[in-house]
Image (spheres, grey):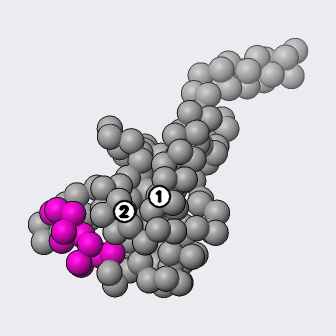
Amino acid sequence: MKLVSCAALAAALLSIIPASAQAPKSAAASAAAQKEFNGFIAKFRAALKANDAAAIAGMAKLPFQNDAAIADAAQFRAKVYKPDFTAKTRACLQREKPVHDRDGDGNHTFSIGCGDNIFVFTRTAAGFLLTDIAMND
């Protein structure tokens, strides 16, 4: 009888635990987010292959990294594209597989590590955009 009471208590306690607490969240992108990113990265890589700095600037969230000194496409091309998108880096970005994650706000992000940098693409209201270039620890 005591065993039945313990089992009933355990079942009752388990039923009040939220489903999200029972299983870890998957880091996999939703099918819709993956499809949207695949379209974005194909265009991004085509622009890289053509060394089209203006097109890449158009696929970046400006002001870039919330820096007022990189508020428009011309500033992005001069201060970000020229030093950070070398031929070696462009080749890397074209071949490396993006890794999915979620940012602190729950937005889908994909990142690609190339050398000393990690390039971060975030799903925004305007679609996926290059939002960050961070140091690769």
- Residue that protrudes farthest toward the left in the picture: 68
Choose between 67 and 103: the one closer to the eye. 67
Image quarter of the N terminus: top right
Of the image marks 1 and 2, the number of the one nearer the N terminus: 1
Badge 1 crowding class, 10 Å Cα cut-off, few under 14, some 14 to 19, many 20 or more, is many
Q: Is residue 56 above or below residue 103?
A: below
Q: Is residue 4 left or right of residue 135?
A: right
Q: Is residue 132 left or right of residue 90?
A: left
Residue 18 position by quadrant: top right
Residue on which the image places disc 1: 44
Label 1 close to label 2 by CB (< 8 Å):
yes
Q: Which mark is residue 56?
A: 2
> Is residue 28 in view from this perspective?
yes
Q: Main secondary structure of the magenta part?
A: helix
Distance of label 1 from label 2 (alpha carbons):
7 Å
Badge 2 crowding class, 10 Å Cα cut-off, few under 14, some 14 to 19, many 20 or more, is many
Residue sitting at x 29%, y 76%: 80
The span shown in magenta is 71-81
Residue sitting at x 64%, y 63%: 97
Image spot of residue 69 (x, y percent): 13, 72
Q: Is residue 95 left or right of residue 61?
A: right
- Residue that protrudes farthest toward the front in the picture: 50
Residue sitting at x 68%, y 26%: 14
Image spot of residue 23 (x, y percent): 67, 38
The amino acid at mark 2 is Ile
> Is residue 137 in view from this perspective?
no
Image spot of residue 121 (x, y percent): 44, 56
Circle 2 SS class: helix
The amino acid at mark 1 is Phe
